[in-house]
Amino acid sequence: MLTQVAEGVLVHQSEFVQSNAVVVQGGSGVLLVDPGLTGAELECLADDLAGLGQPVVAAFSTHPDWDHVLWHPRLGEAPRYATALGAATMRDQLADPATKVRIAEHLPPEIHGQVPMDLLGLLIGLPDGTTELPWDGPVVRIVEHRGHAPGHAALWIEDRGVLVAGDMLSDVLVPMLDTDDDADPVEDYLAGLRLLDAVAGVAAVVVPGHGSVGGAGQVRERIDQDRAYVQALRDGEEPDDPRIGPSAQDGWDWVVGVHEWQVQQLRDRSGARPSSA
Ligand SMILES: [Zn+2]
């Protein structure tokens, strides 16, 4: 089911981790961001778009994680863009034939065997430094930053006041730092949040990769919440964060495990790092 969140902007939510696909209506069809998860959901999305009479004319993946790079034949053959680094990272991963097998094997039980893998990750990298998505529709600005994943980008649809945040600004997931590929994920994450700060005053809607869509007041609130969490990690303090507190929504207690794992990762890294003078 597509839900309108702003004029010409609709969201299709997956049951799995409340993953949000975003549809932006343009002149000759729609832009589709991070299409979604299971085969049944992708078919449902394709049905909804057919109902609107709107073909997919362009797509964008916010970052090269499996849940953001899926596709279904019924969505057609539009170019699927990502940042240059995002697409290159995906291409490197797929160069190893074991990657898809590993992703499929590690899918959580509730979606195991239900995620179409054939067209996973076939992305076109936009030239480095591209600031606007090439398509026939409202201007979509690409806000690239490190911190969560290589080549991660938020999209800012200024005319509609919509910030598509990728895997940031979630009300259910704490910031997940890229402790694998990023030399300084904490500072990079904070720098990414500063980039989003620039639109916080004017954005009317924020669509996170996972979680609920937020209204105007929540853009600033979520940026501040993510920043406080990352700063607490940096400073070795226990974050006072509702997403990992006793009030966390039912079924989301595993986020505490993610948090504890990150604390450990950062601790291991700082221990392994040669002491700086
Ligand atoms: Zn995700």
Image (cartoon, rainbow, N blue to C red):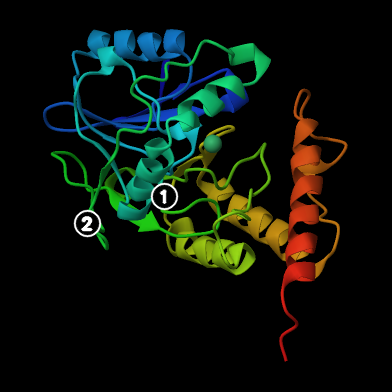
Q: Name the residue: 60% across, 69% down.
A: 187
Q: Is residue 62 visible?
A: no
Mark 1, Cα crowd under 10 Å, few <14 / some 14-19 / many 20+, is many
Within the displayed image, which quadrant is ligand 1 positioned in? top right
Nearest to the observer: residue 134 or residue 122: 122
Cα gap from disc 2 to disc 1, whole angstroms: 16 Å
Residue 70's disc is none
Amino acid marked by disc 1: Ala
Q: Circle 1 is placed at which residue position?
A: 154
The image quarter in which residue 185 lies: bottom right
Left-right relation of 232 to 115: right
**Image height of 64 relative to 212, above or below:** below
Quarter of the picture containing the C terminus is bottom right
At x 68% / y 45%, what residue is drawn?
Answer: 174
Is residue 235 visible in this depiction of the protein? Answer: yes
- Farthest residue in the bottom direction? 277
Residue 12, given in percent of the width and then of the height, sits at 43, 22
Look at mark 2 in the image and give the residue it sits on: 127
> For residue 256, what is the image quadrant?
top right
Q: Position of residue 217 (x, y in %)?
A: 56, 49
Residue 188 pos. (x, y %): 55, 65
Q: Nearer the viewer, residue 180 or 171?
A: 180
Helix, strand, or loop for circle 1?
A: strand
| Residue 121 appears left or right of 109 | left
Of 41 and 267, nearer the camera is 267
Q: What is the secondary structure assignment of the residue under circle 2?
A: loop
Q: Specify which label sits upstream in the sequence, 2 or 1.
A: 2
Question: Is residue 65 shown above or below 45?
Answer: below
Q: Few, some or many C-alpha atoms within 10 Å of disc 2 (few <14, some 14-19, many ≥20)? A: few
Residue appearing at x 59%, y 21% in the figure:
105
- Quadrant in which residue 220 is drawn: bottom right
